[in-house]
Structure formats: C-alpha cells, structure tokens
Amino acid sequence: MNIWQSIKRYAEENFILASLILLILFFGFSSNNFFSVITLTTILNQLPALTVVTVGMTLVLIVAGIDLSVGSVMGFCAAVVGVGAVAWGLPLWMACLMGLGTGLICGAVNGLLVAYFSLPSFIVTLGMLEMARGLAYMTTGSQTVYIGSQIQSLALPLPGIGVSAALIFAIVLVITVQFVLTRTVLGRYLVAIGSNEQAARMSGIDPRPYRLMVLAVSGALAGIAGIFNAAYLGSADPNAGIGLELSAIAAAVIGGTSLMGGRGSIIGAFAGVLIIAVLQNGLAQIGVSEPTKRLITGAVIIIAVLIDRWRAKHASAS
Amino acid sequence: MTGSARLAISNLDKAFAAPVLKGVNLKIARGEVHAIVGENGAGKSTLVNILAGNLRKDGGEISLDGNIYAPRGPRDSYAAGIACAAQELSSIETLSVAENIALRAVPQKKFVIDQGALNAKALKLMQRVGLQNIDPTSPTEALSLADRQLLEFAKAISFDCQLLILDEPTAALTAPQADHLHSIVADLAAAGTSIIYISHRLDDVLAVADNVSVLRDGELVVTTATKQTSASDLVEEMTGRSQTTATQRRDCVSDAVTVLEVTDLTTDELPHATNLTFKSGEIVGLAGLAGAGRSELLAALFGLVPLTGGTVRRIHNGAEQAVMNARQAVRNGIAYLGEDRQSMGLFPGQSLLANIMVPGSADIRTLQRIDYKKEADEGARLVEKLSIRCENLAQDIRQLSGGNQQKALIGRWLHRDSHILLLDEPTRGVDVGTKNAIYDLLISLRQKGKTIIMASSEIDELTTVCDRILVLSDRKLVRSFERNDFSEQGILAAAFSEFTASVENRSTSDSKVASRQR
C-alpha cells in the first residue's frame, strides 16, 4: 500500500521520467532484442547531437524566443569541419574549433538582430535556417566530405567506460546548464525575462544582453552538434540536421518547457530527448513501418503537452 | 417633463471589487447635451461602458425612449441607436480610414466590398468633421493623434443615432478643431440627437452642454443647468467630501540630504523642462488627471524612457551619478513600482519567493550560486513584515489576492533596501485594510530616511501620506504644495489649470500633439 502510494506520488511529480521508464519497459517486453547492446549503443550514439542542440533550444524557449536555425547551423558547422580538415588540411582540433566558432557567429548574428534590432526570433532564425543551409552546400560543393576515422574517435565508446566522449560531454552539459538555470542569478533572470519582459525591465534587468547570449549559446551548441555529427558519420554531410530544430523543440516541450517562455527544465528536455530516441528505436525494433513511426511520434508529442497542460491546471486549481 | 425622456437611468449600481456606481439616477431629454464631470475614478467611464454594452450593470434600470434597455454586448447598443466615441481610441490601425469609419456597415456588392461607395461615404463624413485633407484610403496608423480622435468622432456619427456618447472627445484636439467639433455637436442636438459629453475641460463643458451632472465616488451628487454654475462650483462639487487631515504627526527628519536631483528634464512625453530636488525622509506626491504625465515622470526618473534633455542625478554619500537606465537606477538604490501590477510587476507562474527576489539579486554576480536557505529566510522575513497572506513561499504569485500581490511587489524593493521608491498608484485595486497597511509602511520607511515619490489619482491619499505634493497638468509641472497648504480643491484646481486655460495655451498644445505623433 504505502510503497504503491509513494511510487504513485513520485510518478506524478516526475511524470516525464515515469513515462520514459514505462516506454522502455514496454519495448523491452514486446521485442526480444530491445535490451541488447546493439540497441543501446544505437540509441546512445544518436543522443549527443540532439541533446546538445536541445539544451540550447530550451534556453531560447525559456526567454520566450525560438531558434529554428539550429539544424542548418549544425549542417553548416559540420561542413566547415570537414572542409577545414580535408580541403585545407588543418589539424583536426583546429577544424573543430572553426566549426564551433562558425556556430557561435551564426548564433550571435541571430541574437544581435533579435535583441538589438527588435526583430522576432521566429523570423530571424527562419532566415538563418535558409542561409546556413545554403552556406553548407556552398562550402562542400553539395558533396559529402569524407574526413576519415580520426574524427570518429569522438563518437566511439571510450575503452573502459563504454560511452563516447561526445555523450559524456552532452551529459555534463545538461547537468551544468540545469544548475545554472535553477541555482544562479543568471538562470533566474532568464526565467524572469521569459515570464514577463516588461516586469523584468522594470526590475532593473536589461533583457537585451540575455537574449543575445542565449541565441549565441544556442548557435555555439549547434556548432558542437555539427562536430559530433561529423564524428558519428566520419564525414561532413551538407544535408545533416534537416528537421533537427523540430525534434529539439519537441524534446524541450515534452520535457515541460513552455513555448510562451518563463518555464523550462534542461533535465526535462533531456528526458524528452530520451523519449524520442527510445520511441524511434523501439518502434523500429517491433517492426513498425516508417510512416506509422512518424504518426506515433507526432501523436506522442501532442499527448505529452496535453497531459502537461492538464497537470499544470490541476496543480494550480488544488 | 414632456413625454418620456430619451435616456432614463434609475438606481444604477455597478461594483467590481468595490462599488463603482452607487444608485445613479439620470434623465436626458431629446436633443439635450448633457455633460458628466468628475475626478478620475468617479465612475464616468464605467457609466459609459454600461451604456455602450461593454459592461453589464449590477442593479437598477435603464430605459431608452421609454423602452427597457439591457444590452448584452456592443451590438445591442448599436441596434438601440447608441453611438459612442470612446476615450481610448479604438480605430484599427492597419485598416484604411474609410474602412474604419464604415466598419459596422461596409457597403458590399455581391460579397465584395464596394470600394467606391465605401470611400464616398467616408469622405462625406470626413469633410463634416474636418478631415477633408486626408485620403480615405490611407492607413489609419499614418494619422496624427488629433486626426485619429476626429476619426473616432466620425465613426460615432456615421449612422443616425438617438444617443451619442462622447468621452473626452477633445483631449488631443487643437482649439479650432475642438470648436468645429462643438458646432457639429450643437447641430446634432438641434436635429434631436441626445448627447452625453464627458470632459475634463470644464470651459468646454460650460460652453457646449445644456445641463451638467457631477459624479463623485460613484454617486451622482448634483445635476444643474450649465447657465447656473461655474467651473469653480463644479470643482467644489467634484471634491465635495470633507477634507481628510492626516492623523499621524510626523517628525521632520532633521538630517535631510538631497538624494535625487532633476535638472531641465524633458522626454518625448514630457515636453516642458522640469526641475526637481528630492531629499531623504520625505514622501512626495504626484497629482494630476489621467494623462497629465505622472506615470511618465516616474518612468523618466527610473531611466525607463530616454531623456530628450536634462539630467537625473542620484546623489549618494557625496558622490553623484547620472541615472541613464533602469539597471543603473536599481544599482543606485532606486526602486520602481509600475502602475499596472499584472503587466509591469508580476512574473506569473513563478513562486512568491522568486517574485520577491528577482531584482534583489541585482548586485550578486550573475553566475554566483544562490543560497536557497538564506533566500528563503529573507523571503519569510519580508512576508512576515508585510503580513502577506499566502500558503507558503513556493505558492504561485497568481493565486494571491491583488492586495497581497501588491505587498509582494513592494517587498521586492524592501529586500534590496532601496533608498528611493518610485511608486505609481501603489494602492490601485487594493482593499481599504491593505491600503492603510501600505500607508503605514510608507510612513515608517520615511522615518528611516527613505525617499518616496508616489503618483496617485486619489488626492485624499496623497494629502494623507505626503509631505509635499507636485501637481501636473497636461504634461507640465504646474504647482507644488507644502504640507501646511494642502487643500483638495487647490490641488484639483491646479490639476485642471492647463485644461481650462484658454486659447493662448491651447495653441502651444499643437506642438505637443505633434511631438506625440511618432
């Protein structure tokens, strides 16, 4: 009795985590090899790029913005890494640094236009989505650039630990940003700006530098995701990251982040990433066709938000 | 009384949190121009909104030409022949001038808008109100404030109405434009339309209206013929109530020093150079009618709007610093409480504690870790001190009552130990008990040497707590009253002064109106 009650309460408070566990259990029982090493490594290998991008997206959403450009920026940054390492023959670390810098610049341009020219982030980042994709094709000549096995070490499980350096980076990032968001003044300011910008301004907080910073961070993280993507593939694909922004928004929203701003959790968003990844792979494992997979994934996003909305209403009513 | 009146209102009641209209009785005859005057918050706008169908009455009866009139929405008021030119301009900025005028009855040819008929109809009305120089197809957002007010008037008279309500129709107009509007009003009245005319400009009221009613605190205190009254009589009726003298005897703070100095300040909203000095341990009130510039002055002192001239200097421990923006103001111990709690103060969905602590952390480095324990202790102390009623500190701020939300927002700045508090309508929408608690709090802060500058539309509130009252009229600082010459009538007369001033001042208002158009 007591155990059930406490489990129930815990599940209610950690609704996303509970759904994730249920999902894993469901696939574990309905498929013979879901709990296999191959499945696990497949899922984990997909995670770092989406996780890193989702962290940036969540920050942008919290200040009531949106960053639609992350997928293209990731593709562009991967292209820069590939061309830098292969065509220009730069050392790999320098090519990666260039990729990161490219993402930072794209994000900073977004942020500058949104914060200091008062343009809506939806429009600015939509424009950047097109531009970055165009630049990705231009730098690679629309060809996939093979970088080689050297870069793949980032994405391969480290000996003795069993997970890749990229995944470790992503997890450390999640924890760090969650800490910043909940336990520092910076995090509190971001939430305040997203919750009521005018009230924030009247409390002596200038929202502009924070808006700029958040979009720049999102761009830089898309750059890192580009590096991870190149590492995962061993090559720079100019088509990488198409539609990634939508997955990132979905993951953030499943994790309890509000598109209206002022509410969001990095840990929650990470759980959202896991739910999407588990769902994708689990459905494939039990032999669901690609169209059905998309149908179910879409429905899950909407249902998750519905339940979340209902819970919020329920909580404020009681 | 011959036959039934055009409009008869009996025992009309309306309450929001507190009663706003109390047993109002009013009769208006056919072809009568009836003015309604009163202080801010006397209930004029509520009355207009009930007639226009925007608000429902709580009690009483309204009849039009002898028929019961109980509108369920603005459409009903339109159907009953009531036209209304609201104080807040309601034109749709992205539509053309002609479309705005004809919005209720757009001429159509087989489901397609008949542009020719539309523009011809609009042009006729525009010529009548004095907008003949405007192209009816131009977008409304291109119009000046004055032209938009005339557009509002044109919209109201765009159909044959029985009752025309004009709420501050000349606020943005120049003298010739206002005279022209008044001549149309006279024509309409001669043709049998009844008109309710609401205005702060008492000279206009006396010139245009047949009869005038005075609203005071939701009660209709008197109705007289305009011939038998004067502007000063009306002001007396509007304030009426016995003077409330402050109860607490306050000692002067002996070691008062100047803490804030304003030199030749001008902004887009405040075109006249303003010079002010504020000392420690005083409460300064800002009085004036709606739109007189009280909120604009407070916003300028806090650095929320760019100055077009002059300086605001904070003097602290002998050092001087110009206040350039809100962030700097907060860091220099200046606090600000906006007039609208919902949009300017609260962080909805966040906890009470987070709402109190937001600006409090302004001098902590941004990546420094928050000490949850210390923060909760500080929050509990403030909740206790301000007696904020809540379940706990983690409660969503939206669940608190308006008065408690207001206390939390004041608490925000007490936590920071701000030296100068700029408060815009600190007791708006707050019950009497909380009001008194806020007054006590302000006076105790003054004893500690804080400076409080508060804007309020309730003059008796200002005379109760303030040491000094500055009166603004038409965006200009017109008078300063020391505590021993506080008189509600004197303050109100000063508040009206720029509005009642005759033509010479009006002409200068041309340039002001122009500067407001941007």
Image (tube, coloured by chain):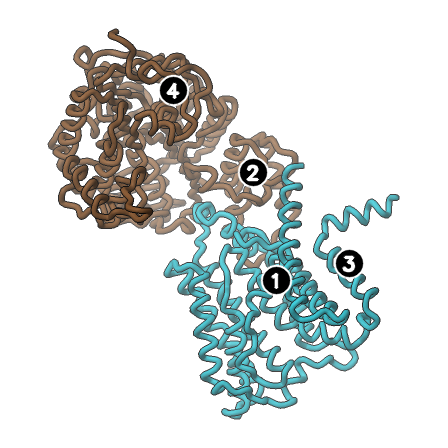
Q: Return the disc, 1 or 3, that comes first in the chain's sequence.
A: 3
Q: Which one is in front in this view, the residue at disc 2 or the one at disc 1? A: 2
Query: Is there one chain holding both mark 2 and mark 4?
Result: yes
Closer-to-camera residue (B406/B62): B62
Amino acid under label 1? Val
Q: Quadrant of residue B460?
A: top left
State which tag comes first along the sequence, 2 or 4: 4
| Position of residue A160 in the picture relative to residue A202 (left or right) | right
Q: How far apart are marks 3 and 2 (CA)?
A: 34 Å
For the residue marked with disc 2, what is the amino acid? Arg
Q: Can the viewer see residue B512?
A: no
**x and y percent of residue A37 in the render?**
80, 76
* Callouts 1 and 4 in the same chain: no
On residue A22, which mark appears?
3
Q: Colour of chain A?
A: cyan
Closest to the observer: B430 or A16?
A: A16
Residue receiving disc 1:
A177
Marks 2, 4: nearer the viewer? 4
Between label 3 and label 2, give the one nearer the viewer: 3
Image mark 1: chain: A
In percent of width and height, residue A159 lies at 77, 82
